[in-house]
Amino acid sequence: MTKQEVRARDFSTACHAACGQVRKYSGAPYINHPAAVVELVRSVAHTPAMLAAAWLHDTVEDTDATLDDIARDFGAEVAQLVEMLTNVSRVTDGDRATRKRLNREHLSRANRAAKTIKLADVIDNTRDIAQRDPEFATVYLAEKALLLEGLRRR
């Protein structure tokens, strides 16, 4: 691991632990999910910035970390990737379908590196959800089918 990747792992671990975030179905430390995403990204063509962003992909969305924190500590390229991966919708934006549409539109404009990380994120989450919550998996998989269409756009 590069120094940047180690710092990203440690930052993500601390952020998710500080807010008490754990994996929904297993109660395992949340950092297990970013670690799985990193390993999937590592298995394809990638850059050091992609690996750092894979560690950090949920920090802005789920913790007190900000994009400014990411930019300051990891640089503009990593912050840009994390921004592309962070949901833009808010609870006040409407129902679940509306919020998911807003997030898909945002992600469809992302670069290939961010889309690669997002695909790894979807793969890891799908494994967990399909295994542990088959009833919700039908909803989740339908939403992800729509997301995959956006990931194919250039």
Image (cartoon, rainbow, N blue to C red):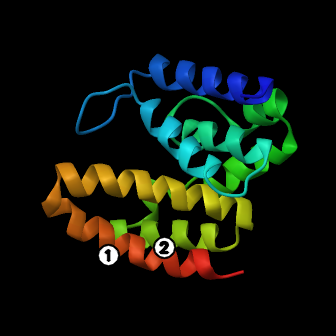
How many angstroms separate mark 1 from mark 2 (CA)? Answer: 9 Å
- Residue 127, x across and y down, in percent: 32, 54
Q: Which residue type does callout 1 highlight?
A: Ala
Q: Label 1 crowding class (10 Å Cα cut-off): few <14, some 14-19, many 20+?
A: few
Circle 2 sits on which residue? Answer: 147
- Tag 1 secondary structure: helix
Task: Report the front residue among 97 and 75.
Answer: 75
Residue 24: quarter of image: top left
Horizontally, residue 7 falls left or right of residue 26, namely: right
- Residue 43, x across and y down, in percent: 60, 52
Q: Could you tell me which residue is drawn at 62 percent across and 68 percent down?
A: 106
Q: Which residue type does callout 2 highlight?
A: Leu
Residue 33: quarter of image: top left
Q: Earlier in the sequence, mark 1 or mark 2?
A: 1
Does residue 88 appear in this view?
no
Q: Could you tell me which residue is drawn at 70 percent across and 72 percent down?
A: 109
- Tag 2 secondary structure: helix
Task: Report the front residue among 42 and 70.
Answer: 42
Circle 1 sits on which residue? Answer: 142
| Image height of 60 relative to 8, above or below | below
